[in-house]
Amino acid sequence: MNPALNLLHPYPFEKLRALFADVTPAADKSPIALSIGEPKHASPDFVAQTLADNLAQLAVYPTTAGLPALRESIARWAERRFALGDNGLNAETQVLPVNGTREALFAFTQALINREQADALVLSPNPFYQIYEGAALLAGAQPHYLPCTAEHGFNPDFSAVPAEIWQRCQLLFICSPGNPTGAVVPSETLKQLIALADQYDFVIASDECYSELYFDEAAPPVGLLQACAELGRTDYARCVAFHSLSKRSNLPGLRSGFVAGDAAILKQFLRYRTYHGCAMPVASQLASIAAWGDEAHVKENRDLYRAKFDAVLEILAPVLDIQRPDAGFYLWPRTPISDTDFARRLYQAEHVTVVPGSYLSREVDGNNPGANRVRMALVAPLAECIEAAQRIRRFVESL
Ligand SMILES: Cc1ncc(COP(=O)(O)O)c(C=O)c1O
């Protein structure tokens, strides 16, 4: 077998199971999971209906590049959302449908990394979505972690990265809005990164799967393609953005998203994907067209999250060091005791599950930037989020 498989770290949920193995949670309390980042709001009926109406398409093989109509609908959506201008994104050459961003982030790394460079690095935020690391390791590159701390607005301090690291970097992952921190990488920083990508010849993969979950309707998070367009770079050279219907439209089971950006890179990525065999079923493509074409359900989705953040922050802010994130559906508070003790004792006392921050980050030079923080996903219904917040508050007050 591929020896690199042995380099893969256990997934955070495996570690969580081990942490809770000998703990008996309070039997009189119903379990509440704030641990899993799975959207729980209802999927839009019109998307489900489109899927159902097109089941006859199960009889045809889909193409890897997807239907032209799907790529068109994605291109027009991205142009509207990121102010790319009319025909700012070429549906033929600058867009590819993918079966969710997880699959795409992984596959993209395999297609991109040049294994002939023995010391190749894949840079990623720390804490981070674990797929970036696993993808790098299986592609034969070494992950290099950039700490995201409160002192730097929960984004990496890119100015602190030495030239020697940029020289070895083949791929830079950014996650904006971030999981778990919720931080958005500012436009100015994106533009500096684009300049660095030119200078050191690396590719930027921007995971923007939480980009549609924001609080201020007048100020949606900026995206990498938008920063390119503002620089007049509508060839999006060295830049690719990853988007998904999972969080935006509550369709994690549809497995639908897209990659958009640099045409030369996407051409090779399409070639890779043809062999990889990951074409999206036609019925899913048609349902995706319906989803990308509607914003009303996305606005309703944001309203639901906004109400939950308002309620939960009101309960927890008096007792925890906790902030409203820039965007996304996670809270990332500092814990008054170690993050693992906090998660374990909270589970025992209140039957509420949160993820220790240190399980989402790697220790570098004795420092784990996720230590003494926990991740709480506000995916449950409002009443359950409020109940969880009240239990967490009671627990914190008991410490
Ligand atoms: C940061 C981040 N990227 C990508 C994904 C994958 O999402 P999907 O494959 O459903 O698009 C997730 C899912 O939780 C995530 O948190």
Image (cartoon, grey):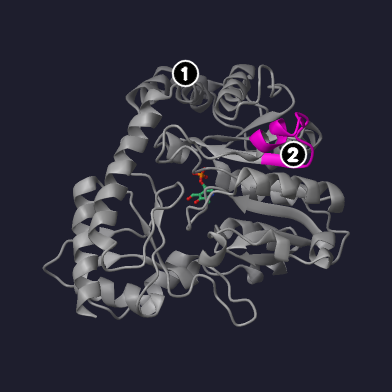
Q: How many marks?
A: 2
Q: Residue furthest right?
A: 116
Left or right side of 5 for 303: left
Please name the residue shown 52% across and 40% down the image: 221
Q: Secondary structure at mark 1?
A: helix
Q: Quadrant of the C terminus?
A: bottom left
C-alpha distance separating marks 2 and 1: 29 Å
Number of other residues with Cα within 10 Å of mark 2, as a class: few under 14, some 14 to 19, many 20 or more: many
Q: Position of residue 234 (x, y in %)?
A: 75, 28
Amino acid at the residue labelled 1 = Ala
Residue 331 sits in which quadrant? bottom left
Start-end of magenta stretch:
226-240
Please name the residue shown 35% across and 28% down the image: 44
Q: Secondary structure at mark 2?
A: helix
Q: Is residue 303 visible?
A: yes
State whether residue 145 is above or below residue 307.
below
Q: Which residue is mark 1?
A: 56
State whether residue 158 is above or below residue 53.
below
Q: Which residue is mark 2?
A: 269
**Residue nearest the viewer, comparing 10 with 37:** 37
Question: Is residue 304 shown in magenta?
Answer: no
